[in-house]
Amino acid sequence: MIQFLAMLTMLIDHIGLVWFPENMTWRIIGRLALPFYAYCIVLGYSRTSNMNRYLGRMTVIALLSQLPYQIAFHRLEVNTVGSLLACLLLLRLLDKWSGKPLLQVLLAAAFAGFLETVPFSYGAYVIILVLIYRYAQVQQYTLFHFFLNVVSFFVKGWFIQAFSLFATFLIVYLPDFMRSADKVKIPRVIWRSFYPLHLTSIAIVYSVQSNSPFI
């Protein structure tokens, strides 16, 4: 169910961003997508039987998505899957440095700074959110996510990002619903191909409508 909600809310967000930027309803619903994807990354990291293959898949998806991402949204930044790939690499390195808390903190700070500088989609925000889901107690998710949104508002002016808290609320307070809804099985090929395919579709349609070349 988390996978389905992640794809659905992301699609709604991107349609709103491209074609209905003046209507914030689309973007508000879309704020739920990143927490769902971030949580899926944490689950995937803990459950995968082949980390190298997992990293490889994420790398391919990020590379395939980059040009459509830039064309669709006119943003010179690394796409969101690229940001999640960086989070995955960080989790792996943090586990390798287990027992060295100072080095782990410095490493996380370095990754956060790197994502802000390059820049990557969502920057340090996505790093911190993934770390919350990975290391905090489930009962603390909502509180930490709330404070992350408060800081993001004062530092970056991200008011609308506050609505992303509803995704964490569903994860924490409606786990039975999320588990029961797991009957909605998403084929792996759809889950893995959705991001680049939907971005490519948006980029093509937008380019045709605006009479601008796709490449």
Image (cartoon, grey):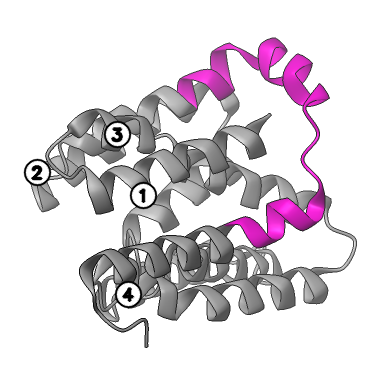
The residue pinned by badge 4 equals 71
Q: Residue at x 53, y 19 (%)?
A: 170
Work out which residue is located at the far bottom of the displayed protein and give it.
215
Q: Are marks 2 and 1 in contact (CB under 8 Å)?
A: no
Upstream in sequence: badge 3 or badge 4: 3
Mark yes or no: residue 135 visible: no
Q: What is the span of residues highlighted in magenta in the rendered image?
A: 168-194
Upstream in sequence: badge 2 or badge 3: 3
Q: Amino acid at mark 3?
A: Trp
Residue 187: % across, % down: 81, 46
Upstream in sequence: badge 2 or badge 1: 1
Mark number displayed over residue 26: 3
Mark 4 crowdedness (10 Å alpha carbons): few <14, some 14-19, many ≥20 = many
Q: Quadrant of the N terminus?
A: top right
Residue 176 is covered by the magenta coloring: yes
* Secondary structure that dominates the magenta span: helix
Residue 27: % across, % down: 28, 37
